[in-house]
Amino acid sequence: MKRRTILKTIAASVIAGGLLGTPAFAEGVIKLGASAPKTGPLAGGSTVTYWPAIQLWINDVNSRGGIDVGGNKMKVELVEYDDKSANEEAIKNIQRLGTVDKVDFIIPPYGTGINLATAPLINKLGYPHIAVTAVTDGLEEFVKRWPNSFWTLGTSKAFAESLVGLLTKMRDSGAINDKVAVVNVADAFGIELANAAKPAFKAAGFDIVYETSYPLQQQDFAPIVSAAQNAAPDSFIAFSYPADTFGMTKQATIAGLPVKAYYVGVATAFPAFAGANGPAAEGVLGAGGINADASAIKDFMARHQQVAGQAPDYWASAVQYASLEVLEQAITAAGSLDKAAVIDKIKTGSFKTIMGDWKFENNIITKFWTVGQWQDGVFRGVASTGLGGEVQPIVKKGWK
Amino acid sequence: MTQMRSQEWWTLAVAAIGLAVAAAIPLYDDGYYLSLSVNIAIYVVLCTAWTIFSGPTHYISLATAAFFGIGQYTVGLGIESYPFAVLVATAGVIAAALAIVVGMATLRLSGVYFVIFTLGLAELVRQVVTWLQTNFTNAVGLYVFTDFGEKHVLWMLLALAAVIYATGWLINRSRLGFAMRIIGNDETVARHVGINVAWSKVVLFAVSGAFIGIAGAILAPRYAYIEPPSAFNPVLSFQVVIMALLGGTSRLWGPLLGVIPFTILFDFISAHFPNHTSLLIGFAFVAIVYALPRGVIGLVDDLRRPQAGAEKARTSAEATQ
Amino acid sequence: MDILITGTVLGGTYALIALGLTLQYGVARIMNLANGENLVLACFCAFWLQAAAAINPIQALFLVVPAAFVLNWLIYAIVLTPLVRRATHRGQLEVDSILVTFGLMFILQGVMLLIFGGAYFSYNFLAEPVRILGQNYGLNRIVALGAAVAMFILLYGFLYRTRYGTALRAVAVDPAAAGLVAIDVPRMSAFAFALGGALTAAGGVLLSTYYTFNSAMGVIFTMKALIIVIMGGVGDVRGAVLAALLLALAETAVASLVDPGLTLAATYGLFILVLLFRPQGIFGRQAT
C-alpha cells in the first residue's frame, strides 16, 4: 500500500497547492501579468525581444520609486507564465492572470497568432491590450471588434509596400535592375507579406523571375537558393522566420549568391544575426530597423545590455519598451488603476517614448520602421512609414 | 444483447452524476477554473476517443493531431457559409474518411510502422493544407468568430464525451467488441475463426478518428484564429498518448484517470515554476512511470483485486457459454 | 545533376541523425524520444567549447563523443534497466520506454533551457564554399557527409566483422534466443544504447557547424530520425543509411522540381510506398 500513500500525498499536495498557492503581494504595488513563450518554437524570439525589455522597464520604473498613481508612487511587480508558444496555454494563462491572480494590467503575449487568440479574452476581462509583436493586416477590424486593443508594430501590407518602395528607389538610381526573386515561408506572416509584395512589385515595373513558398521549419535551402541563382535577379527577397532567416543566409553565403539587394524577414534584426554571419551580414536588408543615432535609442540599448545582460534586437525590443512607457504614462494620466480609464487615456493621450512622440490614431500607431539594413555592425532603419531618421541603403557587395 | 448487469447500472449512475457535476461548473466559475475544466474536457474526449481504437488493438496512433486539425479547418473554412452543427458533422465524416484510407494502407503492417506513419500524418496533412491554402486561397490563417463562450464549449465537449463513452460501451457489447477481444488475445486465432481482422481495425480507427475530428470542430470557436501550426500541432498527439497510457488503456475510463491528475499536475507546475517547467515535468513524469507500471488503472485494479478476481471469473464463464 | 549532389550531401546529414537511434531502437529496443535532445545537447556542447575554449568542432568530437557514451550508458543503467527488467513482453517495454524517454526529453530540454535559454545559436566553422561541378557546397556539409560515411564504414565493420558486433546483431534479431547462446543481453543492450547515444552526439557536433539550433529543436530531429529508422528496417544500419539517402534525394528532387512546400508529402509518399512493397523496411527481417 506504499504506492497508494505516495499517490495520496501527491494528490493532496497538488490540490492544496493549486487552489491555495497564489503568491501574496505587498500592498501599494501594481501587479502586472505577462504570459509569453519561454519554451516552444517561438521562444527563440521572445527571449530576445520580449522578456528582457520587460525586465528592463520594471527595473527602470522601480528605481524611480514606481509609477505615479494619483499622487502615490506604486512599485511594479510581475507575474510571469510560460505559454509554451501555444494558443491554448496562452488562453489559460490569461484566464489565470485575470481571474485568479487578479492582476492590475496584462502585458500582451508575444507573436501575432497568440495575440489574436487571446484578444477576445483580454477584451472580455476589460484590460488594455497594447499589442507589440503582432504584425498583420485587418487592424481596423480588430479595433472595431476589440476597442480595448492597440496595435503598434504595423501591418504586413505596409512592410511589403515599403520594401517595394525602397527597392524602386534603388532601381531608379541605377543601383539594381528590375529582376527580383521572391520566396516566403508558408505561414501567416510570410504569406501576407508575399501577397502584398508581389502585386506591388509588378505595379512598380519589377519582373519576378523566381518565386516559391517553403514550409515552416524547413532546414535545407540549397534547392531554393540555387534555383534563384539560376534566374539571375539583382534582388533576392525572402519573407522568412527566425530559423529560416539564418539558414537561408548561410546557404546564400556558401553559394555566393551574386545579388545586390538581399532581404530576409523576421530575426534579421537580432544581434545574433550579425554574430552568426560575420562579414556576410553587411548590407543584408530585413524587417524592422531603428534610428541608431537617436540618443534615446542609444541609451536604451546600453541600459538593456547592462540590466538584462543581453543586447536588444534592432526592431521590436524598443517598441516593446515604448508600449510599457505608454502604459505607465496612461496610468499616471488616469490617476488610478481603473482599466477603463487607462484605456481611454491610451486612446486619447500623447506619450513620450524612446521611439519618439506617440499618439494612437484609431488605436493604431501609424509610424513604424519597416526595413532595416546591416551597416557596419548596426541594423539601421532605411525605410519607415514616416518616422524620419532613415539612412541611405547600401548595395550588397558579396558575402565576405 | 445480454441484460445490463447491476454493476453496469452502477457505472452508468456514477457516470451520469459525474457529467452533471462537470456540467454545473460554469455556474460556479466563469474564469480560470472553467478554462481548466475545458482543457481537461478536451483531453478526456481526445484520450478516450483514442483509446476506443488503441486500447483493443494495442496500436499506438499518433494521428490525433491530423484528425483534430481537420475538424478545426472544416469549421474554419465553412463558418461563414454553413451552420455550425453541419460543419461539426462534416468534420467527423472527413476525419473518418481519412482514417479509413490511412487504416487500409497501414493497418495490415505491424505496429511500429503504423506509429511512425501516423506520426508524420499530422505533418503531412498540415503541409498539404498549407500548400492548398497558399496556392489557392492566398491566406493561411482563418478567423472563426462566433458567439460561443467557454461554457458552451464545455457543454458541447461533455455531450461529446457522453456519446463517446456510450459508443465505446455499445461497441464492447457488440460483435465488433467481441471480435476485438479475440484479436487482442491472439490475432492468428481470430483470422482462422473467420474474423476480418483488418476491417475490424479500420472501423475502430474510423470511429476514433471521427470523434477526434468532431472535437477539433467544436474547439474551433474557442481559439478565434486558426492556423496550421496550432491546429495540427504534433505535440498534441504525444500528449494524448502519454495521458492515455498513464491512465491505462485496458478500460474505456482509464484515460479519464490519466488526464485529470496529469492536467492538474502540469498546470500546478507551470503556474508555480514558470522557469523550470520542463525540468520538473520531466522528473514528475519519470517518477510516475516508475510508480505506476500499468497506469492508474493498474493501481485501481490492484486495490480492487479481490472483487476483480470474481469479476474475471464471471466474465470468462459468460464468454464460454 | 546538382540535385543528386545536393541530395547526397543532405543524405549525409540525415544519416548522422538516424544512425544512433537505429542502434538504440533496434538492439536495445528503446524507442528513445529524447534522441533529438541528445543531438541538440551535443550541438550546444560544441558551441560552448568553441566559444569558451576555442576548441574547434573536430577536436570537440573527441571530448563530446566519449562523454555522450558514458552519459547514455548511465541513462540506460539507472533509468531504463528497471523498466527492462519488469517488462513482461516487448510491447510493454516499448510503451514504458516511450513514456520514460518522453520524461527524459523534458528533463534534457529543461537543463538546456536553464543553461542556454531559448534563443537561437549559430556559429561558423569550415563555412567555405567548395565547388563541385559548377555549384558551391559548404565545406562543413561535405565534411559531415564524409564523417557519416566513415562512421558507417566503421560501424559496419564492427557489426559484421567482429564477434562483439555479431553478438549485438543477434540481440537485435531475438533477445531471448541470444540469451540462450550465452550472450550477455543486458550488457549488450546497454552497450548498444550508449553507442547509439555517442553516434547521435557525434552527429550533433557536426550538424552544429551549419545548422541554427535552440533548446526546443530536439523534437524535429527525433521525428526525422524515427522515420528514417523505420523506413530502413529497424535495427539495420545499412537500411538506415540507405533510407537517409533516399529520403534526402526525394526531398531535394521534390523541392527543386515540384515545390518546396510538398517535401513532406514526398517523404510520406515514399515511406508508404516502401512499406507497401516491403513491409519490413528496406533491410528488415520479415515479422514472424
Image (cartoon, rainbow, N blue to C red):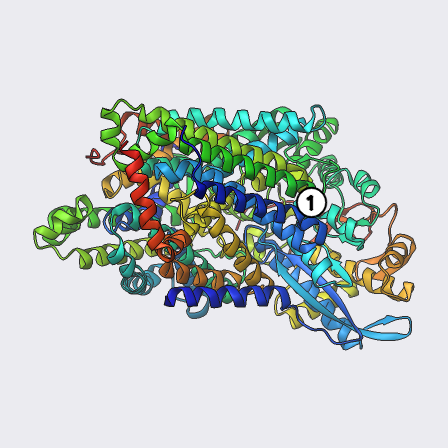
Instruction: Identify which amino acid the numbered label 1 is placed on.
Output: Glu
In the picture, residue B143 is in which quadrant?
A: top right
How many numbered marks are there?
Answer: 1
Along the viewing direction, whichever of C56 and C165 lies nearer the viewer = C165
User: Residue at 83% across / 47% down in the picture?
Assistant: A364
Instruction: Classify mark 1: residues with Cα within 10 Å, few (<14), some (14-19) or many (20+).
Output: some
Q: Is residue A3 above or below residue C178?
A: below
Along the viewing direction, whichever of C3 and A121 lies nearer the viewer = A121
Q: Residue extending furthest left? A: C181
Q: Chain of mark 1?
A: B
User: In this view of the protein, can residue B3 be seen by the observer?
Assistant: yes
* A400 displayed left or right of C180: right
* C54 displayed left or right of A81: left
User: Residue at 23% across / 30% down in the picture?
Assistant: B188
Q: Is residue C94 above or below residue A26?
A: above
- Residue C158, x across and y down, in percent: 16, 51
> Which residue does the numbered mark 1 point to in the structure image?
B150
In the picture, residue B93 is in which quadrant?
A: top right
Q: Which image quarter is the C terminus of chain C in?
A: top left
Q: Which image quarter is the N terminus of chain C in?
A: top left
Along the viewing direction, whichever of B96 and C242 lies nearer the viewer = B96
- Residue A268, x across and y down, in percent: 62, 50
- Residue A173, x across and y down, in percent: 74, 38
User: Residue at 83% across / 46% down in the picture?
Assistant: A366
In the picture, residue C274 is in which quadrant?
A: top left
Tag 1's secondary structure?
Answer: helix
- Residue A394, x across and y down, in percent: 67, 47
